[in-house]
Image: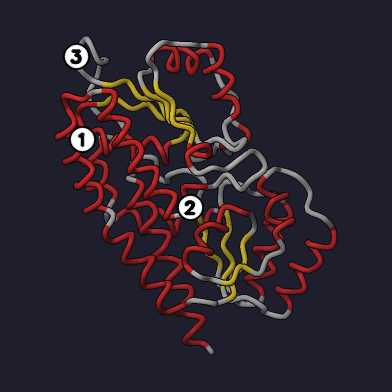
Amino acid sequence: MVDDVRAIWVVLGCVVCAGALLVGCTTAGAGSVGSKGVLEVVAGENFWGNLAAQLGGDRVHVTSIVSDPNTDPHEYESSPADARLFATANYVVLNGAGYDDWASRLLGAQPRAGRKVLTVATLLRKKDGDNPHFWYGPAYVFEVIDHITADYKALDPKQSSYFASRYEAVQEDLVPYRQWLVNIQQHFARTPVAATESIFQYLAQYLHLDLVTPYPFMKAVAEGNDPPTSSEATFEQQIQARAFDVLVYNVQTVTPLTTSIRQQSGQKNIPVVGVSETIQPPTATFEVWMDAQLNLLTHALQAQARAR
């Protein structure tokens, strides 16, 4: 796992400073609408919080609750400080689909007139039990960006033109991200890949990669459960047969089983690409983080293509 995290951070190191200058570690401004004219925004996780900060610029103050690289967001336990943040927020962005139920409970206990809540799962017409890793689905990300901007304009209409300009700036910053996506689609469509959990499912679908790992295996690992024995056996058979070109490994959801899968893949000279649940390092922007991971994935796919 250490090697995977280091690989991500090395790629990020060349560009993270520029990203940090843009969003100020996912927060900007201070105060609240009606006092200093700034929206108080709380995001359950830093991937949505970072985008919310970029889209709001200096007209929002964003706090992302889950950002610790050593924390598995699935297992996060809320605190009284989190409750206070929700109680004073003008705008809240949650993931939903069971991913951050702790936040939904806090909101229910802290009613506030005029507070606007975006639950991404609801926006995307998803439900509990569906794969909750929406931020790894590019089409979903673009839809969330559109919706946050519309919500900002509704909450602070006088700043609509400013929010429109921030939207355009974020779209410009996402150009490299879109280019990575198109490049992989064009050159590696239908390439067989595997993943230790469902975090990679939406991205694989968008990239037209053939994700061959049994879904019950990925879903069980993502939910912290033991996978069905049959799915585990199938996965190990796929490794031995070199039935996929790249293994995508979640560096924030590590178990003895996923570690074994990673090691077995390495022994078969199958490249392993580490991805993280939340933005790593936390001072990076969403797009810099994603660009780095797509860079690593591209190089792994290229290496396997050259080896054939």
Name of the residue lying farthest toward the bottom: 308
Nearer to us of marks 2 and 1 is: 1
Left/right of residue 135 with respect to residue 24 in the rendered view: right
Q: Secondary structure at mark 2?
A: helix
**What's the mark number on residue 136?**
2
Under mark 1, the amino acid is Phe
Q: Residue at x 56, y 16 (%)?
A: 108
Dot 2 or dot 1: first in sequence order is 2
Picture coordinates of residue 264, whole percent (x, y): 69, 69
In the rendered image, the quadrant that contains the C terminus is: bottom right
- As measured in the structure, the alpha-carbon distance from the residue carrying label 3 to the one carrying label 1 is 17 Å
Find out whether the residues at labels 2 and 3 contact each other: C-beta distance under 8 Å.
no
In percent of the image, x 41 and y 38: which residue is there?
A: 48
Q: Amino acid at mark 2?
A: Tyr
Question: What x and y, as percent, mark residue 83?
Answer: 50, 14
The circle on residue 36 is 3
Labels 2 and 3: the sequence-earlier one: 3
Of mark 3 and mark 1, the one earlier in the sequence is 3
- Side of 275 where 283 appears, left or right: left
Q: Position of residue 133 (x, y in %)?
A: 54, 47
Q: State the SS at label 3.
A: loop
Q: Is residue 55 above or below residue 108?
A: below
Q: Amino acid at mark 3?
A: Lys
Q: Is disc 2 in contact with disc 1, using a CB cutoff of under 8 Å? A: no
Q: In the shown orientation, is residue 178 left or right of residue 101?
A: left
Which colour assignment does the render follow?
secondary structure
> Considering the numbered disc 1 on the image, is that residue within a helix, a strand or a loop?
helix
Query: What is the distance, in whole Å, between disc 2 and disc 3 at their CAs?
Result: 35 Å
Q: Quadrant of residue 160?
A: top left
Report the residue marked by disc 1. Answer: 163
